Image: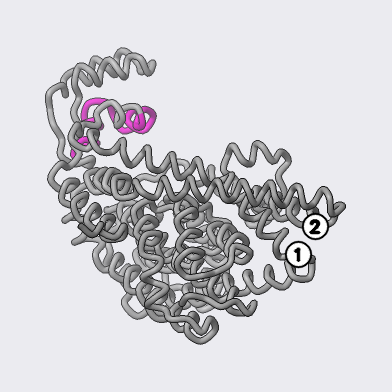
Amino acid sequence: MRKLALHWQILIALFLALIYGLYFSTQYRITEKSLTALKKGNCPLEMIQKLEALEGQSHKTLKSFNIALEEKLGASQVDEYKVQLLQAAYWNPAVGYVSWMGELFMRALKMLIIPLILSSLISGITNIGSGSNLGRIGFKTLMFYVSTSFIAIITGQVLVNLIRPGVGAEINFLQEVEGLVDKQRSFSEILVEIVPDNVFTAMVENDMLSVIFFAILFGFFITKVSHKHSEVLKNFFSSVFDVMMKMTLFVIKFTPLGVFGLVAKTIADQDDIMLLMSSMGLYMLTVIIALAIHAGISLPLILRILGKARPLQHFKNMGTALLTAFSTSSSAATLPLTMTSVEKKSGVSNKISSFTLPLGSTVNMDGTALYECIAAIFIAQAYGVDLTFLQQLIIVLTALLASIGAAAIPMAGLVMMTVILTAIGLPLEGVGLIIAVDRILDMFRTATNVWSDSCGAVVIAKSEGETLKV
């Protein structure tokens, strides 16, 4: 019997997870176990006694649970202990039975990221050879990434001004957003922090730009030492990379199970999906259409004209990686699968893929840049602010710079959104308008980011005279 292709297994897992998550939606309950957890969390005894009145009640939405909490405790106390209260009251045993698969899968992918990036970049740079070759490929790569991000932003800007989804949007649909301002970094800070003060700390904290900077320097200077030493180091990092790719292929086999666990939990935790669709549907549609135009028209045209490649064939080759990116909302976690697909199926050499893809997973965020532009203008429309041409130009440029600094992790775009809103003088509370649907849209924009990375690898490989399978 013929084995079902992996991308079909993932699609089936996605469909089943959607049904599972919708059927077993998350509820919030105060039980005896909840009260015990709050006591262990050093919550005030007076608050726990007040919560005993809610024991046994079940709330199908987070909104209704928050209203019940505020009636008993008051808004200030709910805000202070919100995280502990939600963790203690979270009730979804059916999702708990499967969500561990998603968590285990994500941990396995994250386990591979740092050693894979280090070994692939260092071995790739030593294969590139001279500093002039490295400079040429590096310049082409950055030019491709900046150009496609700019095209994505302009696509988003045109659509959001045509559709105007923010006009008449409900300001009272705001959700509270915590901790985003604390995580905000200026572009100058991002540039300075590229140079790690401790490379091992950068690895532990998954600071991708710092790790990539160190790997590029290390790989470059391997070519500058004596032939005897450089050969030892080249062979060592090539061997490490081979081992990491074997480990990646092993982890990939469990992708359908991981995707099922991740998506089932994401869908189950969405607060009243139908209400969300009715109130934010036009905004979501604007983002998805813009992403579809960029991923389905702009990038394939670039791939066809500059890369002389067959876009549809390359898209089929990237199926597993794109579905994983969609499910995990993390381009960094998807990197091992992206490298495997681009090298094994599309025929890009390790010399090119090992340099362009790790860099792309960190600095090439087409989907994120497009989304941030649409979101900022949507928030302005919702608040009734008529943006001038100069303000929209500031959004375009800031979105381009912010997307480069956006971490390759879920919901990083929200953190960078505060930079854009600050630049044009809009209230940071506006992020609360879009946070409810951010996790869903994050899946679409991450898939776009990964697709753009892979197109970049093909275009750069072709420009270097490589013969590809696409």
| Coloring applied to the structure | one colour
Report whether 185 appears left or right of 62: right
Q: Tell me whether the residue at label 2 lies in contact with that at label 1, contact meaning CB atoms closer than 8 angstroms.
A: yes
- Image coordinates for residue 178, horizontal then vertical, percent: 43, 41
Q: Residue at x 37, y 37 (%)?
A: 104
- Image coordinates for residue 368, horizontal then vertical, percent: 46, 62
Whether residue 448 is visible to the viewer of this picture, yes or no, is yes
Quadrant where the N terminus lies? bottom left
Residue 75 magenta-drawn? yes
Foreground residue among 64 and 443: 443
Work out which residue is located at the far front of the displayed protein and give it.
1
Task: Please state the extent of the stretch shown in magenta in the rendering.
Answer: 64-83
- Image coordinates for residue 165, horizontal then vertical, percent: 30, 70
Crowdedness of circle 2 by 10 Å Cα count: few (<14), some, many (20+)?
Answer: many
Badge number at residue 223: 2
Q: Which residue is mark 1?
A: 129
Report whether 199 appears left or right of 372: right
Q: Residue at x 24, y 15 (%)?
A: 49
Q: Amino acid at mark 1?
A: Gly
Secondary structure of the residue carrying tag 1 is: loop
Secondary structure of the residue carrying tag 2 is: loop
Report whether 392 appears left or right of 144: left
Q: Main secondary structure of the magenta part?
A: helix
Whether residue 401 is visible to the viewer of this picture, yes or no, is no
- Image coordinates for residue 374, horizontal then vertical, percent: 41, 68
